[in-house]
Image: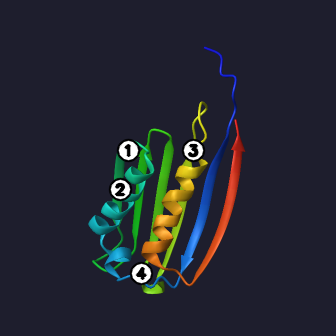
Amino acid sequence: MSLRRRYSHLQVLADFHQCATPHRYLQDPSVIKRVLQDAVRQSGMRIITSLFHQFGSQGRGVTGLFVVAESHLVIHTWPERNLLNLDVFFCNLTKNNERKAQQVLARLVKLYRPTRIIKKVIRHRL
């Protein structure tokens, strides 16, 4: 099968500073997992599996990963600093998923309400 179209594949790396969301959205792995799961599913992406880890005792940071059919979404939180880091990468050789990646990011911005975002956008060409 020959693929005639080549799309850029959007990867967004973002740091959310001074999040104004309740702390459970930065501390509780089950809450974070549900929030990300909802955002990914509402964008139309298909979740393959997930893995979440909480560091130290309750109230410490969380690292979470969703493997989606089209790549991944990763989150790292630092509740003591009201900070989180995201890596959203949705790729596909046969269609453009940039809009879906932007939808997930916009949904998380709305929920976490950071006062400052440092964002890097990478367009991979495969």
Q: Secondary structure at mark 2?
A: helix
Distance between the alpha carbons at the discs numbered 4 and 3: 30 Å
Is the residue marked by circle 4 packed among few (<14), some (14-19), or many (20+) residues within 10 Å?
Answer: many
Looking at marks 3 and 1 on the same chain, the residue that comes earlier in the sequence is marked by 1
* Residue 97: assigned label: 3
* Residue 37: assigned label: 2
Evaluate if marks 2 and 4 touch, with contact meaning CB atoms under 8 Å apart: no
Looking at marks 2 and 1 on the same chain, the residue that comes earlier in the sequence is marked by 2
Looking at marks 2 and 4 on the same chain, the residue that comes earlier in the sequence is marked by 2
Is the residue marked by circle 3 packed among few (<14), some (14-19), or many (20+) residues within 10 Å?
Answer: many
Is the residue marked by circle 2 packed among few (<14), some (14-19), or many (20+) residues within 10 Å?
Answer: some
Looking at marks 4 and 3 on the same chain, the residue that comes earlier in the sequence is marked by 4
For this view, does 69 lie left or right of residue 57? Answer: right
Q: Residue furthest top?
A: 1
Name the residue beneath numbered marker 1.
47
Evaluate if marks 4 and 3 touch, with contact meaning CB atoms under 8 Å apart: no
Name the residue beneath numbered marker 4.
79
From the top left corner, tell me how far across and down residue 73 is, in percent: 48, 54
Q: Amino acid at mark 3?
A: Asn
Name the quarter where the N terminus is drawn: top right
From the top left corner, tell me how far across and down residue 48 is, in percent: 37, 41
